[in-house]
Amino acid sequence: MASGGWVRIPPPTYRQRLLIGGVWFFAVVYVGTNPLGTLGRGVEDAIGGGWITVTATILVGDAAAAALVLLVVTLLTPALDVHVARGLLRLRGRERPFADLVGALAELAVDTPPSRYDKPRRRPRRDPVSLRLDLAGGGRFRVVLAIGPTTTITRERAGALIAAVRGSRITAPTASYDPDGRFTHLNFPGRLDIPGAIRLIEDPQRARAQLR
């Protein structure tokens, strides 16, 4: 919604943050299960309680990991305000010109080829499509464009974000052996120039299929 010329792109909802961080959470749980089990056995040796103590230690560790993942996702996807007429972004309370945007990256979940042993999915995947925008000076932030088959950014917000991208200095990187950038999509997967970032914002679903 616009207020005083500013168009706000809100951060992801709590449910969307869970979906975005789900892969990382399961990865952390997978990696941390054995260390947490070892810790639980150590706690059980010290205070007793048998398998209940071990299980409780693992559950507490998993809960802490989930909270940490949610915190990281929250920090990486802040609310963004865009003022098209003034050419300004407001991020974490600081105003910056559109020209401070210097890089763009499409972030998509890895889609592994289906196996004949896989069971048919009853529901469509809920993988997020995010646009990471890099700022001059090393900062970066993300805007979630879609969750699964649902585009989450409204037309008004997409228009404001497109205006910011058009006024930016976003360029796709090139390798020394490919100065024309013909193979940038292979050398730097997901990296976008201004037209590519605009296409992603305009139609995240079509761009999802093209970028895989």
Image: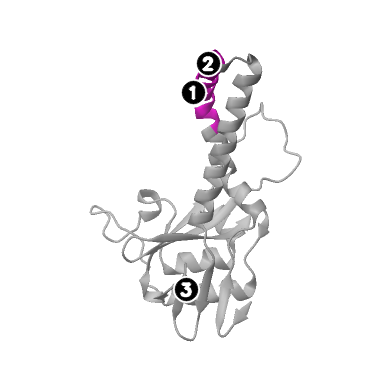
| The N terminus lies in quadrant | bottom right
SS under mark 2: helix
**Residue 133 vs residue 115: left or right?**
left
Q: Is residue 181 above or below residue 47?
A: below
Point out which mark residue 46 bears.
2
Image coordinates for residue 97, horizontal then vertical, percent: 39, 77
| Residue 31 painted magenta | yes
Among numbered discs 2 and 3, the one appearing first in the sequence: 2
| Residue 170 painted magenta | no
What amino acid type is highlighted by mark number 1?
Pro
What amino acid type is highlighted by mark number 3?
Arg
Residue occupying the point 62% across, 47% down: 18
Residue 133 can be seen, yes or no: yes
**Residue 58 vs residue 118: left or right?**
left
- Is there a contact, CB below 8 Å, between mark 1 and mark 2? no
Q: Closer to the camera: disc 1 or disc 2?
A: 2
First to last magenta residue range: 29-46
SS under mark 3: strand
Residue positioned most to the right: 122
Residue occupying the point 57% across, 46% down: 21
Image coordinates for residue 178, horizontal then vertical, percent: 27, 55
Comparing 3 with 61, the one in front is 61
Point out which mark residue 90 bears.
3
Comparing 70 with 51, the one in front is 51
Q: Closer to the camera: disc 2 or disc 3?
A: 2
Image coordinates for residue 95, horizontal then vertical, percent: 42, 75
Name the magenta segment's main secondary structure: helix
Give the residue number, with chain letter if any, for mark 1.
35
